[in-house]
Image: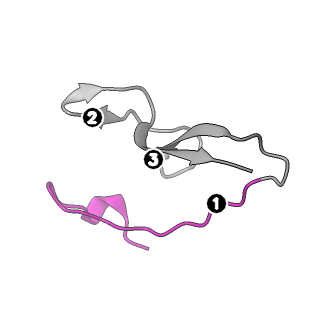
Amino acid sequence: AYPTTGWLPGEYLCSEQQLLLPADLASGNYTIKVGVYDPGFEQRLPAVAAGAAVGDAVDLTSIRLDP
């Protein structure tokens, strides 16, 4: 509900999301990534981390899933 056009440099935003995982998902290490889509949701925008282009997503964290 807060469009990117209103974001300010250095501002921190928080968006809580729920991830529904398949019951048969294998145990292991998984990386959670985030990307931003263009206004028409047709493609992800370029991502930058630590001042360098990193593709179209940024790694947030890694988690381990056990049975």
User: How far is disc 3 from disc 1 in space, using C-alphas?
Assistant: 17 Å
In the picture, the disc for residue 19 is: 1
| Quadrant assignment for the N terminus | bottom left
Residue 21 in the figure: left or right of residue 19: right
**Which residue is depicted at the point 45% across and 32% down?**
56
Viewer-proximal residue among 46 and 20: 20
- Rendering coords of residue 4 (x, y %): 33, 59
Seen in the picture, residue 45 relative to 7 is either above or below; the reply is above
Q: Name the residue under label 3.
A: 36
Q: What residue type is labelled 3?
A: Val
Viewer-proximal residue among 45 and 59: 59
Looking at the rendering, the stretch of residues picked out in magenta corresponds to 1-21
Viewer-proximal residue among 55 and 38: 55
Report if residue 18 lies within the magenta region. yes
**Which residue is depicted at the point 78% across and 45% down?**
25
Residue 4 in the figure: left or right of residue 26: left
Residues at circles 3 and 1 in contact by the CB criterion of under 8 Å:
no
Residues at circles 3 and 2 in contact by the CB criterion of under 8 Å:
no
In the picture, the disc for residue 5 is: none
State which tag comes first along the sequence, 2 or 1: 1
Within 10 Å of the Cα at label 2, are there few (<14), some (14-19), or many (20+) other Cα atoms?
A: few
Q: What residue type is labelled 2?
A: Ala
Q: Name the residue under label 2.
A: 49
Indicate how the structure is coloured in the image.
one colour
User: How far is disc 2 from disc 1 in space, using C-alphas?
Assistant: 24 Å
